[in-house]
Image (tube, rainbow, N blue to C red):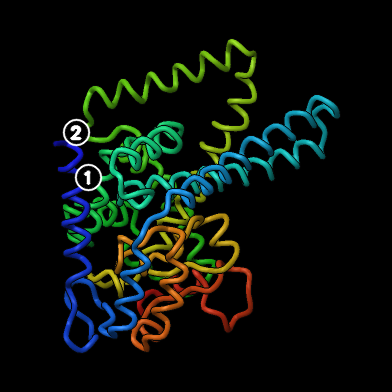
């Protein structure tokens, strides 16, 4: 019965989100835009099919990179000692590992929408074991907060916890006249962001006692196993250090770049696509950068979002009115980037 209830929550909210549209493709009070082109509609519907093979490949890729880089760096320290070169290589390794931890967080997000696979049991087992538990998250509370709070009550005060976090740290309405001023605002709001994220992600409200013990037991087991094999040091420096440093920064940039400063109350006008190789690999992996597409069609799994974006770009309203950032920051002045969008806001 619990599984059916979870399915109904996600399906009901996502289907309602996808059904709010106007008769002429114009902006609607709720979603902002959904294409009425019958060919686009048919192709979008076809893109809503999940494929567990792509889910497993994404997990193998993330975990494979983490394990391989940690192993190579650990071997380098043993062979060459602590030198300028091995420390520099370690810092790069930590950044890349953190980007893969971010990838796992994005797969947790996919699991909340049951986009890993439509089989709720398989979806949740995969989401819990290979992503949520290693990162200390609770998949069930995040599903409730994200689906019911963020998607159903998008940008509603007191109901959308993401919007509440934006307001608490002062980035819901950015006003920056220069990149320097924008950086000052973002740096100033970083510590309040961290203080708000810790209880939201790692000490969730209304968590079942069984889920709390599951999370604690998982990590006590991991620590015990690594201690038995004298591997606590690599566990700390290759998992916890990237998790507490680079991942925190990456997550902050990722969350802020999705909605901050756009000033609207519907998903289409209040959301950015953050594209380009740096965004897509380090900040918004596994299709997370196609955030406009996700808010319009939440049932499209991560590996099909790029195809959906290319399809929707055929619609002039989506192409011209959507916020599409084609790079992160290091590009020519003519290209619309994540940072230029943050500084300009909805203008």
- The image quadrant that residue 214 belongs to is top left
The picture places residue 244, in percent across and down from the top left corner, at 51, 36
Q: Left of 20 or right of it: where is 232? A: right
Question: Residues at badges 2 and 1 in contact (C-beta under 8 Å)?
Answer: yes
- The image quadrant that residue 219 belongs to is top left
Residue occupying the point 47% across, 67% down:
274
Q: Left of 236 or right of it: where is 115? A: left
Which mark is first along the chain, 1 or 2?
1
Residue occupying the point 44% across, 64% down:
304
Q: Secondary structure at mark 1?
A: helix
Q: Left of 331 or right of it: where is 202? A: left
Residue 144 is marked as 1
Image quadrant occupied by the C terminus: bottom left
The picture places residue 45, in percent across and down from the top left corner, at 31, 70
> Dot 1, crowdedness within 10 Å: few (<14), some or many (≥20)?
some
Residue occupying the point 36% across, 82% down:
318
In-front residue for pair 126/320:
126
Q: Is residue 109 above or below residue 259?
A: above
In-front residue for pair 125/212:
125
> Dot 2, crowdedness within 10 Å: few (<14), some or many (≥20)?
few
Q: Residue furthest right?
A: 80
State the CA–CA distance, disc 2 to disc 1.
Answer: 10 Å
Residue 206 is marked as 2
The picture places residue 195, in percent across and down from the top left corner, at 37, 40
């Amino acid at each position: 019965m619990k599984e059916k209830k979870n399915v109904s929550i996600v399906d009901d909210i996502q289907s309602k989100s996808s059904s709010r549209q106007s008769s002429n493709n114009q902006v609607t009070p709720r979603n902002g835009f959904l294409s009425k082109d019958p060919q686009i509609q048919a192709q979008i519907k076809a893109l809503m099919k999940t494929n567990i093979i792509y889910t497993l490949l994404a997990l193998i890729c993330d975990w494979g990179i983490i394990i391989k880089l940690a192993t190579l760096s650990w071997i380098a320290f043993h062979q060459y000692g602590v030198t300028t070169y091995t420390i520099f290589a370690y810092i790069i390794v930590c950044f890349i590992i953190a980007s893969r931890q971010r990838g796992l967080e994005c797969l947790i997000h996919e699991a909340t929408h049951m986009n890993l696979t439509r089989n709720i049991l398989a979806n949740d087992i995969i989401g819990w074991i290979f992503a949520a538990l290693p990162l200390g998250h609770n998949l069930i509370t995040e599903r409730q907060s994200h689906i019911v709070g963020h998607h159903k009550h998008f940008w509603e005060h007191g109901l959308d916890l993401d919007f509440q976090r934006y307001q608490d740290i002062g980035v819901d309405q950015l006003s920056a006249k220069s990149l320097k001023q924008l950086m000052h605002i973002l740096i100033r709001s970083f510590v309040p962001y961290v203080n708000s994220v810790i209880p939201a992600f790692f000490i969730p409200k209304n968590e079942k006692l069984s889920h709390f013990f599951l999370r604690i037991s998982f990590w006590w087991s991991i620590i015990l196993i690594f201690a038995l094999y004298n591997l606590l040091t690599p566990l700390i420096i290759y998992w916890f250090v990237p998790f507490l440093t680079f991942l925190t920064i990456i997550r902050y940039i990722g969350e802020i770049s999705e909605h901050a400063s756009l000033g609207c109350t519907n998903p289409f006008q209040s959301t950015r696509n953050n594209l380009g190789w740096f965004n897509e690999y380090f900040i918004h992996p596994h299709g997370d950068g196609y955030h406009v597409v996700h808010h319009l069609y939440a049932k499209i799994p991560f590996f099909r979002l790029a195809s959906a974006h290319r399809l929707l770009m055929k619609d002039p309203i989506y192409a011209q009115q959507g916020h599409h950032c084609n790079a992160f920051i290091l590009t020519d002045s003519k290209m619309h980037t994540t940072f230029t969008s943050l500084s300009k806001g909805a203008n």
